[in-house]
Image: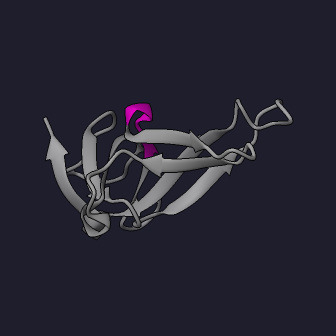
Amino acid sequence: MIYPLGKYLLVEVLKEEIRELVTKSGIILRKPIKDDREDLVVSKAKIIGVDKAHFEKDMTVYFNYFAGNRLVIKGKDPEGKDDIEYLFVHEEDILGVEK
């Protein structure tokens, strides 16, 4: 298991927050489900790993879509369909918590 260090949280973006768009040429674009305003994008994720007193594992948090560093764990499928994707999000980038 991978554990975050310092002021980072390890989160998994919830599937209902991601929409895949396929272009006519077959290119898959992953986009967040959002309003028309590009600057108001907020993502929702579940905490996978945490070393903080005020955050708990499996807690749902909200953060800016552009925050975080992506970590992809490759699966066995050559097309990447079973890859696992996480984000390391800085504690200060968390906008809110769902209880």
In which quadrant is the C terminus drawn? top left
Q: Is residue 40 left or right of residue 66?
A: left
What is the image's colouring? Answer: one colour
**Which quadrant of the structure image shows residue 9?**
bottom left
Q: Which residues fall within the magenta stretch?
A: 11-16
Position of 53 relative to 77 (above/below):
below
Q: Position of residue 39 (x, y in %)?
A: 28, 69
Q: Is residue 81 left or right of residue 59?
A: right
> Which residue of the protein is positioned furthest toward the left in this rendering?
99
Residue 83 spot, x, y in % from top left: 69, 37
**Observer-nearest of 61 and 56:** 61
**Residue ID at (75%, 47%):** 25
Screen quadrant of the N terminus: top right
Q: Residue at x 40, y 36 (%)?
A: 14
In the rendered structure, the answer to whether residue 40 lies left or right of residue 83 reads left
* 91 over 15 or under it: above or below: below
- The residue depicted at 64 percent of the width and 46 percent of the height is 23
Residue 11, x across and y down, in percent: 42, 46
Indicate whether residue 14 is drawn in magenta: yes
Is residue 99 rendered magenta in the image?
A: no
Asked if residue 24 can be seen in this view, the reply is: yes
Residue 81 vertical placement versus 65 (above, below): above
Between residues 97 and 35, which one lies in front from this camera angle? 35
* Viewer-proximal residue among 15 and 85: 15
Count of number-bearing discs: 0
- The residue nearer to you, when weighing 30 against 76, is 30
